[in-house]
Image (cartoon, rainbow, N blue to C red):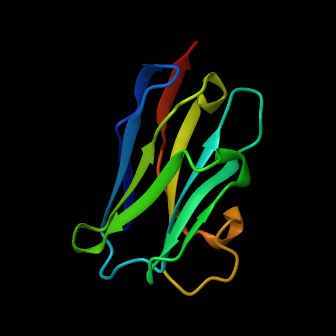
Amino acid sequence: QVQLVESGGGLVQAGGSLRLSCAASGGTSSFYSMAWFRQAPGKEREFVAAITWGRTTYYANSLKGRFTISREDAKNTVFLQMNSLEPEDTAVYCCAAAGRLIWTPREEFEYDYWGQGTQVTVSS
């Protein structure tokens, strides 16, 4: 049974930084794509970033280069470095993993496994 556990969320002032981590356990091999999604209060969940086995990265256009996704396959862990945080970034951030080749890493339906999420709150 694959489990994804996020950590690193918290309260930060606007302009600050946070680094989220997501550790996967229970799988027997690394995942083809690992991603971050977020859901703000009253809004639908949205794509943030994804990284494939080959280190190809995808980002939401709205992030304007403030976030960086990376992964460490030896530990089956994906990271999200978030800089210049804005109040609009306040959300529950969830990681997701796909254990097979996928074609649209920005789409939720591609991912087989999901974490419970970690809260990020950015104060103004």
Q: Is residue 30 above or below residue 14?
A: below
Q: Is residue 114 above or below residue 13?
A: below
Comparing 77 with 111, the one in front is: 77
Residue at 48% over, 44% down: 116
Q: Residue at x 51, y 33 (%)?
A: 84
Residue furthest out toward the right: 43
Q: Is residue 84 above or below residue 103?
A: above
Q: Using residue 92 as the reference point, say whether residue 72 is left or right of it.
A: left
Q: Residue, x 68% and y 62% (percent of image)?
A: 108
Residue 124 percent coordinates (x, y): 58, 12
Comparing 86 with 24, the one in front is: 86
Q: Which quadrant of the view contains residue 72?
A: bottom left
Which of the pair 105/118 is nearer the observer?
105
7 vs 34, left or right, is left
Residue 103 lies in quadrant: bottom right
Query: How many numbered marks have been drawn onto this rendered protein structure?
Result: 0
Q: Residue furthest left?
A: 74
The residue at the far bottom in this view is 101
Q: In the image, is residue 73 above or below residue 93?
A: below
